[in-house]
Image (cartoon, rainbow, N blue to C red):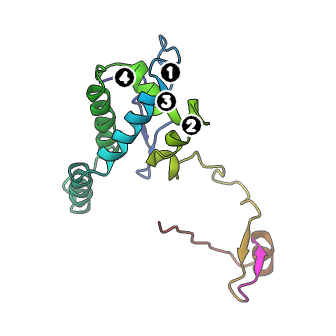
């Protein structure tokens, strides 16, 4: 399995942080023609949503829920396996780090190619380094005042509640 670009970190709270892939030393651009990258990206999407891959995710999460295993990387491993399968299906070696890098970064290397922007992990990307660290002052964003439902800034709501502590819970449902 390729080594230099498959590194992910598991944070103490169990989140998986995968930094932007680092190009292998021997990498040069344009190893895979754009039409092939488009086909490879489509195939990767198909694999990600296949019954087999979805079953692996379901079984893994269920096993974690039941306490049967606690390796939070299992999802990364499943998706990596999808990408390695795509490499093989398109005639490349599983350990070809340069082509794996090109597949993983195709949308960034070709921002003008709409088909590459439709890759599920680009189109619905929710992962990014946190812009606020522990101890930072929260950015002044617009919220809806819980008492009036009118737009109000975060700092205004917090100031109005001072000196009481303010606790915010945020969530997303997709």
**Foreground mark, 4 or 1?**
1
Tell me, yes or no, if residue 165 can be seen here.
yes
Q: Which residue is mark 4?
A: 3
Q: Residue at x 66, y 49 (%)?
A: 131
Which residue is depicted at the point 52% across and 67% down? Answer: 172
Vertical placement of 64 versus 25: above or below?
below
Residue that numbered label 2 is attached to: 113
Helix, strand or loop under label 1:
loop
Q: Dot 2, how many residues are within 10 Å of its Cα: few (below 14), some (14-19), or many (20+)?
A: some
Residue 167 as seen in the image, left or right of residue 53: right
> How far apart are the alpha carbons under marks 1 and 3?
6 Å
In this rendering, the label closer to the viewer, 3 or 2: 2
**Disc 3 target residue:** 21
Badge 3 marks a residue whose secondary structure is loop
Work out whether residue 162 can be spotted: no
Q: Measure how far apart labels 2 and 1 are at the Cα level.
A: 21 Å
Q: Nearer the viewer, residue 98 or 128?
A: 98
Look at the image and say whether residue 162 sits in the magenta stretch. Answer: no
x and y percentages locating residue 76 in the rendered image: 35, 42
Callout in the foreground (4, 2):
2
Which region of the structure is painted magenta?
148-153
Query: Rounded to the nearest whole Å, what is the CA distance between mark 3 and mark 2?
Result: 20 Å
2 up-or-down from 116: above or below: above
The CA span between labels 3 and 4 is 11 Å
Q: Which residue is mark 1?
A: 23
The residue shown at (75%, 83%) is 150
């Amino acid at each position: 399995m390729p080594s230099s670009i498959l590194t992910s970190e598991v944070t103490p709270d169990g989140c998986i942080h995968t930094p932007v892939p680092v190009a292998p030393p021997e990498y040069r651009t344009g190893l895979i023609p754009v039409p092939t990258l488009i086909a490879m990206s489509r195939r990767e999407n198909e694999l990600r949503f296949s019954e087999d891959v979805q079953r692996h995710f379901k079984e893994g999460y269920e096993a974690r829920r039941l306490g049967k295993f606690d390796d939070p990387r299992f999802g990364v491993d499943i998706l990596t396996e999808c990408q390695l399968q795509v490499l093989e299906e398109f005639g490349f070696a599983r350990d070809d780090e340069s082509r794996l890098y090109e597949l993983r970064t195709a949308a960034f290397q070709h921002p003008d190619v709409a088909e590459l922007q439709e890759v599920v992990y680009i189109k619905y990307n929710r992962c990014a380094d946190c812009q606020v660290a522990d101890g930072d002052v929260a950015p002044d964003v617009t919220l809806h005042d819980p008492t009036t439902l009118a737009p109000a800034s975060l700092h205004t709501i917090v100031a109005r509640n001072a000196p009481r502590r303010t606790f915010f819970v945020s969530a997303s449902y997709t």
